[in-house]
Amino acid sequence: MSDTGETIAAKIEAAVLPLLEQNGYELVLTEYVPRSRVLRLFIDRSGDENSVDLDDCTQVSRMVSDMLDGEGYSDLIDSRYTLEVSSPGLDRPLVKPMDFQRFVGRTAKVKTRVAKDGQRNFNGELVSADEQGIRLEVEGEPRTISYGEIRSARLVPDL
């Protein structure tokens, strides 16, 4: 199969996004792991402070599975696959500029693609976010990171 896991995830995300949005859900992140053939969707409720529950995950799993099978998107995946639908959790992934903007003031853990000042892992308060990137305060030092430099980012749970 010529498509990478990221390409498959992007195609499936584009296909399921309208379905989820019209049913009141936000698609936080789509991942496809080719080696284990696992398709993961992290969902949240649109504009709602309540987190998703097991019933939401079950409903979305059925909707998405039916849509992928019915419209041939499951053919993108070589062989059988497992669909996992879950909430983003307390350590929610931050993916889109909107995600970072929504959680300004919270603590985030950010991994960059390339080292910045000899460092690739940053843990600090998300001070601001705009369309170009984010600003973290790490141990009293401001750090500006563009979205293109971010490999992954997650909230650090307030426990």
Image (tube, rainbow, N blue to C red):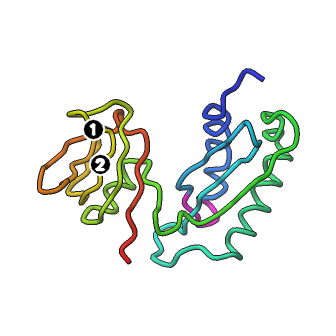
Q: Which residue does the image show at 32% across and 39% down from the upper left?
A: 120
Which of the two residues, 90 or 129, is positioned nearer the viewer here? 90
- Residue 116 lies in the magenta stretch: no
In this rendering, position of residue 114 left or right of residue 116: right
Q: In the picture shown, does residue 143 fall above or below 114? A: below
| Number of marks drawn | 2
Q: CA distance from mark 1 to mark 2?
A: 8 Å
Quadrant of the snapshot with the N terminus: top right
Q: Secondary structure at mark 2?
A: strand
Q: Amino acid at mark 2?
A: Phe
Image mark for residue 152 = none
Circle 1 residue: 119
Q: Which residue does the image show at 33% across and 58% down from the upper left?
A: 108
Q: In the picture shown, does residue 51 fall above or below 155? A: below
Q: Residue furthest top?
A: 2
Q: In the picture shown, does residue 126 fall above or below 134? A: below
Could you say which quadrant of the image residue 14 lies in? top right
Which of the two residues, 1 or 13, is positioned nearer the viewer here? 1
Q: Secondary structure at mark 1?
A: strand
In this rendering, position of residue 112 left or right of residue 52: left
Highlighted range, magenta: 21-26
Labelled pair 1, 2 in contact (Cβ < 8 Å)? yes
Could you say which quadrant of the image residue 111 lies in? top left
Circle 2 residue: 122
Quadrant of the snapshot with the C terminus: bottom left
